[in-house]
Image (tube, rainbow, N blue to C red):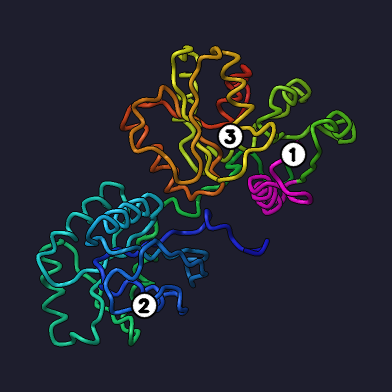
Amino acid sequence: MSLNNTPTANRLHIALFGRRNSGKSSLINALTGQDTALVSNIPGTTTDPVSKAMEMHGIGPCVFIDTPGFDDEGELGELRIARTLKAIERTDIALLLCEDGDFEDEKQWIKQLKEKNIPIILILNKADIQETDAPAIAARIKENCAQSPLIVSAKTGEGIKQIHQAILEKLPEDFDQQTITGDLVSEGDLVLLVMPQDIQAPKGRLILPQVQTLRELLDKKCLVMSCTTDQMTATLQALARPPRLIITDSQVFHTVYQQKPEESLLTSFSVLMAGYKGDIPYYIEGASAIDRLTPQSRVLIAEACTHAPLSEDIGRVKLPRLLRKKVGEGLQIDIVAGTDFPNNLAPYDLIIHCGACMFNRKYVLSRIDRARHQQVPMTNYGVAIAHLNGILDKIVY
């Protein structure tokens, strides 16, 4: 991905579901105009979800996800179905390919998608080989699934434009309306970014939340100044007026809070990402669980990205150190990364999630929903660190 490409996490996620050999791979190739997915007459050709990022007219940046058939068989088939189920968690809009039959599988998947509030577009593919029967099959689909399908042929291109239009009509109401800084700043406001030289960022690079926040501030026509933590005092002295907002790395919350002008608002990149990607009120509420932890408690720390642990890593070193300093060395802390998020969260007294810049919002909200239903408190790195430093009520989000 080039530096000018929209990150996958900020794209609309459109997933294709259906039985084996229903034409999902052919359809995704027709939708993207490229040979994105391997096509074969052999059922089960797609063994893992395949993603293709693209720009769609009227929608903008999106990513199509081709999934294995949900009627797969055998031990490997069950694993493939499990991966298809995981794909649901990051799906903004579902294209469900239907075939003639009893429709029991389709109805079960429609139920699961609706439970997660995912808009569904039903599709009857392969219209080119069932021209005379297609209207009758479509009528049976409507009768059984309570929704009329689009009649499509991936081979001839019939119905492809109708799919594009249906996606536009099914766009989630809040899609592309979320902003990182919300109404904290407006045009002409002075914003100071305090950015320690993060050991996890390669030399010459900034980490993704810093880049995205900086770009949004420039789009808002804000006046932006940046510095490292050790240069904050000199930077403030060089400014003609105090910043409207100071955004810092959560790791130096305490240091920046002590130095900030009284009139300047304070937040962190992680806290902003908590609101942008997740449910900030739920995270704020979840942070109070830190005060109820005991040396016998168990905490789950979840990172969105996978990387080799580095010295002073925030999730694996600094946050556990802060927690154990408050609670006691006996506190059990488990760490997961990437998509390795447990289905059963009951053993945990608290979940602390990273800013999730590598995940789309739907996926983060799916995790929050799982925690909420299992009645496990959840917060995020920045909110937790602000709470541990006693300044959660002093920051903005």
Q: Report how far apart the C-alphas of labels 1 and 2 lie in the structure.
A: 48 Å
Badge 1 amino acid: Leu
- In this image, 396 relative to 235: left or right? left
In this orientation, which residue lies closer to the viewer: 295 or 64? Answer: 295
How packed mark 3 is, by other alpha carbons closer than 10 Å (few <14, some 14-19, many 20 or more), is: many
Q: Does 153 lie within the magenta span?
A: no
**Residue under label 2:** 39
Q: Earlier in the sequence, mark 3 or mark 2?
A: 2
Provide residue 143's location: percent of width, then percent of height. 10, 65
**Which stretch did the figure color magenta?**
193-222
Q: Report how far apart the C-alphas of labels 1 and 3 lie in the structure.
A: 14 Å
Q: What element carries label 2?
A: loop
Using the image, determine if residue 31 lies above or below residue 309.
below
Provide residue 115's location: percent of width, then percent of height. 26, 46
Using the image, determine if residue 368 lies above or below residue 117.
above
Quarter of the rendering containing residue 96: bottom left
Provide residue 28's location: percent of width, then percent of height. 39, 73
Provide residue 163's location: percent of width, then percent of height. 34, 72
Badge 2 amino acid: Val
**Residue under label 3:** 271
